[in-house]
Image (cartoon, grey):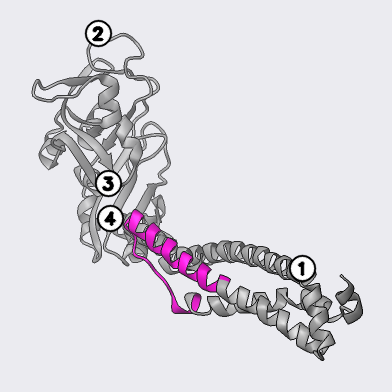
Amino acid sequence: MLGLTATAGGQIDSRFTVLAATEVTVQDLGPGGPDAPLSFPPDASARIRALNGAVRAGVWWPLPVRARTVSAAAAAPDGDGQGLGLYAADPQALEAMHPTLDTGVLFGEFHQQRRDRVAVLGRGAAERLGITRLDAQPAVFVDGSPYTVIGIVGDVQRSPELLLGVVLPSGTALAAYGPPVDPRASMVIETRLGAARTIAGQAPLALRPDAPGLLRASAPADPTALKGGVASDLGTLFLLLASITLVIGAVGIANTTLVAVLERTGEIGLRRALGARPRHIALQFLTESTALGTFGGLVGTCLGVGVVLAVALAQSWTAVLSAWAVLPAPLIGSAVGLLAGVYPSLRAAWVEPAEALRR
């Protein structure tokens, strides 16, 4: 169990490092309202990339889709694209989400600067709209306005809601629908490992040195604290399970030894008649229960190591087995067997020889 704890904890730490430790989010806290401009400057991506430790960054926001119709044809019936999201994103924001393309391409700075009427679909949105191929240059219609579909994204590592949405270049979206109102825009920043908290502290001032209070950066949790918390929680859980298992094993050994005392009463009486003292009888059953506990500890250790290796191989994890968790297991089994045999041994020692020989 301790081996499973270490293995699962190592896997969780690895996933945390890949998915979350390199992501910073900056929220626009601007005054809001229909006429409020974006708090992010036009060159926001370039300003963030100039920071040491930043890889890529871009602004994106969801467009108000409730009052809009999204369909695959200009004359499609109402509800054709119901439930689909409509988003605006910089090319850098789309790349920071690490999309995997099923087909086509992502829009780039060329489309962004020209404000081209192009769109990228998530896999779920493409299936909903019935668009599977791009060789015929299909289009999606937002309130009757066509946008040529140039790519279909099959998966993203960040912001999975995009898989059920239509993504437009932010320049095109600004020209067509104006700045975001509610919710406001946000920026996703991909950083190098270990630089996220530093970038989060520098981003608002780098973006808006005149008014950094308009932006709020959120950094991932401290990796060291999260690692300690995960390891502590898993360790507590599995130690509790291990304690329950030890108690069950101790009860089993005590019950087995007590049955042996009852079945061997005649042997106890004969030994006492031949001169054995009560302490000799007690020592005999204590030795037997301790040996039983030691054997159980050895078998349990072998099974535990085998299970840890099997789970690690099946899940493609790296098995983590600490010597301090494996080697003392037989000794713990011996101690459990010794404690479990105390009462049956004392009961055997209290048997009167004459009474025992009459049974």
- Give the Cα distance between marks 2 and 4: 41 Å
Pointer 1 or 3: first along the chain: 3
Q: What amino acid type should be assigned to the residue bearing mark 1?
A: Glu
State whether residue 203 is above or below residue 194: above
Mark sitting earlier along the chain (2/4) = 2
First of labels 1, 4 by sequence position: 4
Mark 3 in CB contact with mark 2 (< 8 angstroms)? no
**Residue at figure coordinates x 65%, y 79% from the top left:** 290
Task: Give the residue number, with chain letter if any, for mark 3.
Answer: 97
Q: Label 1 vs label 3: CA separation?
A: 71 Å
Range covered by the magenta-colored residues: 296-325
Q: Amino acid at mark 3?
A: Met
Q: Is residue 352 left or right of residue 244?
A: right
- Snapshot quadrant of residue 32: top left
Residue 6: x and y in percent read 45, 67
User: Few, some or many C-alpha atoms within 10 Å of disc 1 (few <14, some 14-19, many ≥20)?
Assistant: few
Residue 263 numbered tag? 1
Of tags 3 and 2, the one toward the viewer is: 3
Check disc 2 and report the residue beneath it.
75
Q: Which of the numbered marks, if any, corresponds to residue 190?
A: 4
For the C terminus, the image quarter is bottom right
Contact (Cβ within 8 Å) of mark 3 with mark 4: no
